[in-house]
Amino acid sequence: MENSIKLKHDDFKSTKNGFLIVAIFVSILFLLANFWLGIISIIITIILFTLEVGVEINFKDRKYRYYVAILGFVNGRWKSIECFKAIIVLRKNLRGQLVSPKLVTDFNYKHVTFDVNLCSASHRTKFSLKKYRSIDDAMNLAKLLSEKLELPLEKYSPILSNQTKMRRKRR
């Protein structure tokens, strides 16, 4: 049985890959122009290529950490899971538009993501673990974490504060 799980944040994977292609091309040009500058730029490109960001959860010690790994060396501070009392899956609608240099809308986009979160008893404090495009993948992770961490899988319903109740009452 595994004691921990690593959830990689791959939100910007395509951006990272595109940047790496440009960085490799620039490194080769630097290598042709100046050997030492080229070697340094290739080393920086390799370091960026191995960059990994994510969340690691240790089931045995009931701790989690947001980590950054470079060249296989992982760095991050462990924190206790005890402040979180449930697991929730949020559906988020992401919208945007790409605009041309002449400020004419070229492309509108919309997609739905499902965000697996640890949350407090009041559902006000949330910690995002992983985003998925598929509800099935998100629910599979939520069920696995619910089983391993012994936390309930709940529907998101934050407790309203008295101020919010009074403000809604005045409307």
Image (spheres, rainbow, N blue to C red):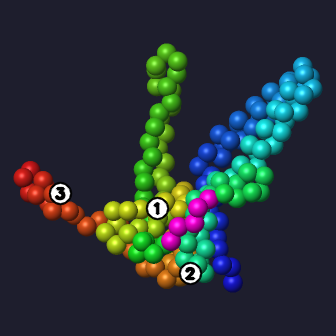
Q: Which mark is residue 148?
A: 2
Residue underneath mark 3: 164
Based on the picture, tell me whether residue 47 belongs to the magenta stretch.
no
- Distance from disc 1 to disc 3, alpha carbons, whole Å, reads 23 Å
Q: Callout 3, which amino acid?
A: Thr
Name the image quarter holding the N terminus: bottom right
Who's the residue at 82% across and 32% down the image? 41
- Distance from disc 3 to disc 2, alpha carbons, whole Å, reads 35 Å
Q: Callout 2, which amino acid?
A: Lys
Q: Quadrant of residue 83?
A: bottom left
| Image location (x, y in percent) of residue 167 | 12, 53
Q: Are marks 1 and 3 in contact (CB under 8 Å)?
A: no
Q: Callout 1, which amino acid?
A: Phe
- The segment highlighted magenta reads 76-80
Residue underneath mark 1: 127
Q: Is residue 89 above or below residue 150?
A: above
| Image location (x, y in percent) of residue 85 | 41, 75
Q: Secondary structure at mark 3?
A: helix
Q: Is residue 2 visible?
A: yes
| Image location (x, y in percent) of residue 87 | 45, 71
Q: Nearer the viewer, residue 13 or 86?
A: 86
Q: Residues within 10 Å of mark 3 (few under 14, many from 20)?
A: few
